[in-house]
Image (cartoon, grey):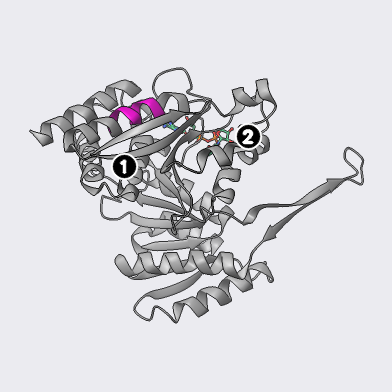
Amino acid sequence: MREYAIAVIPGDGIGNEVVPEAVRVLDAAGDITASYRLRYEHFPWGCEYYLSHGEMMAGDGLAILRPFDAIFFGAVGFPTVPDHVSLRGLRLPICQGFEQYVCYRPSVLLPGVRSPLAGKTPGDVDFVVVRENTEGEYAGAGGRSHQGLPIEVAVQTAVFTRLGTERVVRYAFKLARRRRRRLVSATKSNAQQHALTLWDEVAEAVSREFPDVAMERVLIDALAARFVLAPESLDVVVASNLFGDILTDIGAAICGSMGLAPSGNINPEREYPSMFEPVHGSAPDIVGKGVANPVAQILSGAMMLEFLGEKAAAELVEAAVRVVLAEGRVRTPDLGGTARTSDVTAEVLARMRASAE
Ligand SMILES: NC(=O)c1ccc[n+]([C@@H]2O[C@H](COP(=O)([O-])OP(=O)(O)OC[C@H]3O[C@@H](n4cnc5c(N)ncnc54)[C@H](O)[C@@H]3O)[C@@H](O)[C@H]2O)c1
């Protein structure tokens, strides 16, 4: 029996509602496949921790997390804590400190789920956005001066390095090679003539290593429209931190709900733990109602299992989710149903057990 140490950080809002549900699914997959056991340690880090401790995570949080095999994360964000404090105090230090430079975000329209795009059916939407995850617009460089005065100035500098761009672009090419061999590189080098011309040049140079993959350079505004108008033309998309963030909310939306989209913050070299979380945030508008869709968190867990090498268990979970969505009997309000969070989990667990019999 293999054993993995998992750091669990539910965070805020619906993170506390969907993480325990996904943990039940991960445990059941381990039991059913009799292949692994997850040893969890829970960390209460997030906005409530911040309100009582003045920081979003323990000062030595990264040192604490370092020995774990993976991090299972919910979401951060709380109405009384500024969003830049919560994001920059927890998720970003982990992504940046652990060189999780690939944010892996698949968008797949699953059978039984209705896309808001007219006429799109499963098979029309099946792509992966590889979002740069450690620098770019999220580097945090800049400052404000003369605060509160009419002459106040704010400067936010995007930071693009050759190394940072090259490694994420190369990862995207390798991924495209294993899929349909088509890569779109998101750019805006017409307006961002320093940083994104570097991005374009690096993408072009790396593309020469992958003559079997067709690369297209597409301006981000046109690409946003293409996500809506022709998602079937997309296979792998590589994008900067901010562009990738925006594109993947579109990706989640066209696949039917924010509540379905998983995400992985990956350190491909496995030098540090990787972190798995849904694309969505803490959803303060539905927190406490017990209706958050747990599927995004559950699929993020399946992605974690796959990353750990537990492919059979990951497939068991994904297959059960697909069946539950395809049947459509038990679904949360974001998908037009009336089920509660725990009802969806119960149905997924029942499906997993049934398929193992
Ligand atoms: N990775 C993260 O932790 C992360 C990501 C995005 C936003 N945030 C934070 O979350 C807070 C809310 O941000 P937001 O409203 O822009 O984004 P959000 O993703 O939390 O919510 C957007 C919409 O999607 C719905 N939604 C999200 N997840 C759902 C689920 N599992 N089931 C059903 N419906 C779901 C919400 O109800 C809301 O209507 C903010 O504080 C923001 O900073 C955190």
Beta carbon at label 2 within 8 Å of ligand 1: yes
Quadrant housing residue 33: top left
* Quadrant placement of the N terminus: top left
Residue 112 position in % (x across, y down): 24, 40
Within the magenta stretch, is there residue 20?
A: yes
Residue 297, magenta (yes or no):
no
> Toward the viewer: 200 or 333?
200
Q: Residue at x 47, y 38 (%)?
A: 280
Identify the amino acid type marked 1: Ala
Q: Which residue, given by chain and number where applicable, does mark 1 sit on?
A: 302
Most distant residue in the left direction: 357
Type of amino acid under label 2: Ser
Farthest residue in the top direction? 289
N-terminal-most mark, 1 or 2 = 2
On the image, the x and y values in percent for residue 251 come to 42, 49
Which element carries disc 1, helix, strand or loop? helix
Q: Name the residue under label 2.
A: 86
The percent coordinates of residue 167 (x first, y second) are: 51, 66
Task: Inspect this view and state whether residue 180 appears.
Answer: no
Q: In which quarter of the image is residue 315?
A: top left
Magenta stretch bounds: 19-25
